[in-house]
Image (spheres, helix red, strand yellow):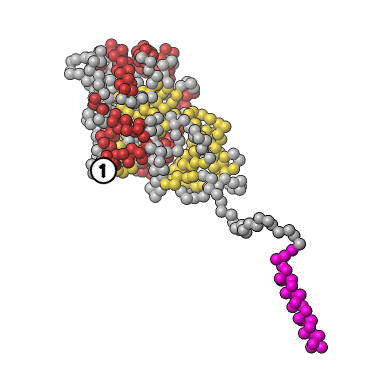
Amino acid sequence: MKKSLIVSIISLFSLMLQVNCSSGSTNEPEDPNPSPNPPENPVATNDVDFWLTTANKNDLLKKQSTVLSFNTTFNNYPNITVDESQTYQSIDGFGFTLTGGSAEVINGLSSTKRTELLQELFGNSENSISISYLRISIGASDLNEAPFSYDDVPAGQTDETLSNFSLEPDLNGVISVLQDILQINPNIKILGSPWSAPVWMKDNNSTIGGSLQPQYYGAYAQYFVKYIQEMKNLGITVDAITVQNEPQHGGNNPSMVMSAVEQADFIKNHLGPAFTSANITTKIIVWDHNCDRPDYPITVLNDPDANKFIDGSAFHLYAGNISALSTVHNSFPNKNLYFTEQYTSSSSDFAGDLKWHLANVIIGSMRNWSKNALEWNLANNPAFEPHTDGGCSTCKGALTISSGGNITRNVAYYIIAHASKFVPSGSVRIGSNISGDIQNVAFKTPNGKKVLIVENNGDLSTTFNVKYNGKWFVTSLAAGAVGTYVWE
């Protein structure tokens, strides 16, 4: 009995051993290309690059390591839907005003630091912010050390033939910096704006306020012609001019007052014909002042003889609402819109400026048809200088440059960089919806990339979807933060 039991156990053990030894072999054909076992949770691929600036400055235009993948997993978050079938205006660029004071402090840097800074501002490297548009003053602005024009003569004299005209006051400043910038970005767009005509053309013989005397309209038109031609001779193409910076503000130094009727008269009877006669294609832009007076550019554009010479209208936002640009667009949809100035104050805080300027200057101007968005001064020293006697003493540059060569990047630097680095000239604004406090604007670049700039204008952190072509990714922004999202 025991012997029989032992034999049975041995037989069973032998059978089990055979089964185990043959478990890796079946009657099914083997996979000729076996692959390693896939992970239980495949790693998501990143579809979207994301740069972030936060109100607390913990992140300053910092590329995030967050993986953002398009998918179709349902959720209840609010949606921003980007629609490239909806197209709006083409974009000329983003930037600042290169004031005489900006040029002075930049030129005060060592040769090495100056070169490095210009590459950072205007180049296309990974560490550059790729500024694509600059405004400059025709003659002095209030952020020069002192007021001047390009045709100043002794008191009591005039120079109607402009024989004394000279760009010499800017040769070693703005012009020298521009020439170096053009070596880095030959395609940068340049807008010229006068703060005042030469004093001898004005009715009050002062750099402050006063108006252009009608008998000098012709000479002043030729002043613009000479300016554009001589800049061209120095290798600088002026893409556009505004007729007068802030023509309803006569209290700055320098400044000049010009009514809408006067501006229309000057353009149709003098400036426009002078440009045509000299074969100048530089764009003529009207207004260049606040959003509270859309009636001013509309009045100028309503004059058919002036209208034919005018490319569009420019705005600032020290008064009024950014929707004024759309008011003018709706009246003259064939004319362009520009946003040419907004300053940040020495007394304001980073978080407040980041939030307001992104919502209004960048996103607001773009959603209201502007072709550009410019913050005010590019650079000044720690005392918010240089400026004229009576000029702005609280205007904070995008950069603060000390006499020792230390460079501080201020809030305006990041405001512009969130657009300029990613949305080059030639991009087109495309459709995107506003969802609650999530302010945004979308673009398609010349190489086909999609760019979405988003600012959380609320007081709480918000999670949301960005939908594109039937799929979406989930992301979030803290209160007051701004993100730029880029995908193919």
151 and 112: which is toward the camera: 112
Task: Identify the residue at image location x=25%, y=13%.
Answer: 161
> Which of the 4 image quarters holds residue 402?
top left
Question: Relative to 228, does residue 13 appear above or below in the rendering?
Answer: below
Task: Identify the residue at image location x=32%, y=33%.
Answer: 180
Amino acid type shown at disc 1: Gly
**In x, y percent, where is residue 132?**
40, 33
Task: Identify the residue at image location x=73%, y=58%.
Answer: 29
313 and 66: which is toward the camera: 66
Question: Relative to 172, does residue 301 appear above or below in the rendering?
Answer: above
**Image quarter of the N terminus:** bottom right
458 and 240: which is toward the camera: 240
| Residue 238 painted magenta | no
Q: Secondary structure at mark 1?
A: loop
**In x, y percent, where is residue 318?**
36, 31
Q: Mark 1: give few (<14), some (14-19) or many (20+) Cα within 10 Å.
A: some
Residue 382 visible at all: no
Instruction: Give the overall secondary structure of the magenta segment.
Output: helix
311 and 21: which is toward the camera: 21
Question: Relative to 462, does residue 89 appear above or below in the rendering?
Answer: above
Question: Relative to residue 69, is residue 258 drawn left or right?
Answer: left
Magenta-tinted stretch: 1-26
Residue 408 visible at all: yes
Residue beneath disc 1: 405
**In x, y percent, where is residue 324?**
44, 27
Task: Identify the residue at image location x=40%, y=14%.
Answer: 306
Number of labels in the image equals 1
**In x, y percent, where is residue 100?**
27, 31
